Image: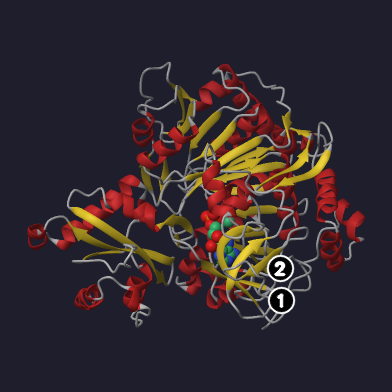
Amino acid sequence: MVNYVTKKSNKLMPSKAMKKIAHLDNKRIYKEAAKNPIKFWEKLATDGLQWEKKWTKAYEQKLPYFKWFKGGKINFSKNCLDRHLENQPDKLALVWIPEPTKEKPVKLTYRQLHEKVCKFANVLRKNKIKKGDVISIYLPMVPEALIAMLACTRIGAIHSVVFSAFSSDALKARIQDGKAKILITADGYYRRGEKEDLLTKAKQAIKSTTVKKVIVVSRLKKKLPSPKSKFLDFNKELESAEPTCEPEIMNSEDPLFILYTSGTTGKPKGVIHDTGGYATQAYWTAKWNFNLRDDDVMWCTADVGWVTGHTYAFYGPLLNGATTLIYEGSPDFPDTGRWWKIIQDNKVTVFYTAPTAIRMLQKCDPKIIKKHNLKSLRILGTVGEPIDRDAWMWYFKKVGGSRCPVIDTWWQTETGGTLINALPGIGPFIPTVSGISFPGTKHIIVDEKGKQIKKPNVTGNLVQVPPLAPGMLHGVWKNPKKYKETYWKRFKKYYDTSDGAFLTKGGLIRITGRTDDVMKVAGHRMTTAELENAINDHPRINETAVVPVPHKVKGEVPVAFVILKGKKDATKINPEQLEKEVKKLTDQKIGPTSRPAKVFIVPALPKTRSGKIMRRILKALLIDEEPKGLSTLLNPKSVEEIKGIIKSSQ
Ligand code: PRX
């Protein structure tokens, strides 16, 4: 295994905390952290953040629950904004690149962003929002998304961001679960040169919910719906608000935000992140993973609808006082050189994206990337799904010019911040291998009984060993049962990641993928159950099985097998028409990212005697492998039938 370490640009920043903890001896930091992780995180929390009151107890644990910095008082927005006003008020906090090339970027300094956040926080207070209220945010990548989120954190409201490509049904389900009082949305946004409507979906979603007011960002200059008392214009309200806003002082353990992620039963789970612990992990992982320096321009391409957008497009860089760049649109608009042009024009130094995007751009004309000057880049990152060697090498050579380390960060919505990766200045950087646990955290691989696997190259279950990392979830919104069942049932004393992994000979962790029914489609997380529920709503479909199959660019794509209602129907139906209808249905229920690549009409699904669908058999048939373990099948005939149907479709 080759370690692609670069010499020049990967020295860790000599931070105050590092000096104290490890005397800048990078390797010793792991040792020091492992000796006493609680003390280690205490030090990081003290050095990285501004607290209103120090905690009385650094860590308390009664599994499956735990608390970080108990008794500590803090305000999150103050840490992202106010404390930078003294030293660098005129430094750029945010650079926003709109998709239309005719439009100018929006640049906000820390002072300007602070003022807007305070004003919008006052708008929220004027609309009777107080500490602990939930606010749903359904916004594309526009500066107002950051302003709205920070404004929530200023007054102690809990934001719940919903991905803007999700359907109105998906938004409604999340609004209802959180009982949101206000929805912040936009009239639309630009995507691949087209105007995408958001307001119609938002209007549908709020019907029969707790939402009293809708605050709309006028991106496409559409007329606001009536009544005026309900639909408010974001920027008009903001302009007329007071520019100062006293922050609400929060307990470290108070919820900062909820973010929904797909559960194995199909119902989205509201993952809860607290304030002090999350802030500590966001601050330090952003600093050390990306070696953030004062003059850095960090671009994390993730949408704010996902956790990566929360922690590394917004909060991590701002907590560190860096400049964050965000882009509204698509990487291939107006051509596939758009991302490279943004990096070149804005001298981006730290670039963080997903393997899907890398694979997509890798396929483009090599002349396009060569035309751009990418020398400003120092560090590259990847996240969201396993990265293959080919994509890794292309990223390292063509984007990073063989100078920049590629940080392959493993983490989850539930973990709040990154947890397993190599650090710049330390390494090693090996294609397809994430690395080791972030200092102060511990991950091991266990067998089905929870026994640690120490041997290399033996795949098992990846678990986190307490004390838990400070950014970890503190529960599932209004559903403690789900929290316990999902994360703590299988291994009791360890947090269950539901990922498979193995150790390399050198003791590094390599992730193999999910062990449950979660798929990663173009880096987006969804479950087979979620899609099956949506497809089963088709009036002519009786039962569905969805399986993910490998895809060259997207990593995985879902394929659906459906059984129709009534025998007569089967002969009358047009399979192409049905496929179209199924895709429309998943668009409507979840969003276009979940669209199945193919829909097969089958007479029966392979099932166990207890009635469980055997998806792994369907998967084997799709990827042309001989299915194993057919002896437990109730209906072995179905396998041959499906094999024939797949063959005849090729
Ligand atoms: O399977 C792992 C995969 O993404 C899952 C978490 O998805 P989500 O909650 O959407 O968060 C994605 C962004 C943090 C994990 O359980 N995953 C994430 N990062 C990697 C990865 N798989 C392999 N390598 C990674 N670097």
Q: Which residue is mark 1?
A: 507
* Amino acid at circle 1: Gly
Q: Which mark is residue 312?
A: none
Residue drawn where x is 76% and y is 36% of the image: 89
Residue drawn where x is 71% and y is 26% of the image: 247
| Cβ–Cβ under 8 Å for marks 2 and 1 | yes
In which quadrant is the C terminus drawn? bottom left
Q: Which mark is residue 436?
A: 2
Image coordinates for residue 285, horizontal then vertical, percent: 72, 54
Can you tell me which quadrant of the image ligand 1 is in?
bottom right
Residue drawn where x is 85% and y is 49% of the image: 43
Front residue of 473/96: it is 473
Does mark 1 have its CB less than 8 Å from ligand 1?
A: no
- Few, some or many C-alpha atoms within 10 Å of disc 2 (few <14, some 14-19, many ≥20)? many
Q: Is residue 303 visible?
A: yes
In which quadrant is the N terminus drawn? bottom right
Q: Is residue 340 visible?
A: no
Quarter-wise, where is residue 542 in the image? bottom left
Image coordinates for residue 210, horizontal then vertical, percent: 44, 25
Front residue of 465/244: it is 465
Image coordinates for residue 493, horizontal then vertical, percent: 67, 57
Residue 404 in the figure: left or right of residue 208: right
Image coordinates for residue 241, horizontal then vertical, percent: 60, 19
* Amino acid at circle 2: Ile
Q: CA distance from mark 2 to mark 1?
A: 8 Å
Quarter-wise, where is residue 404 in the image? bottom right
Residue 31 in the figure: left or right of residue 119: right
Front residue of 635/592: it is 635
Does mark 2 have its CB less than 8 Å from ligand 1?
A: no
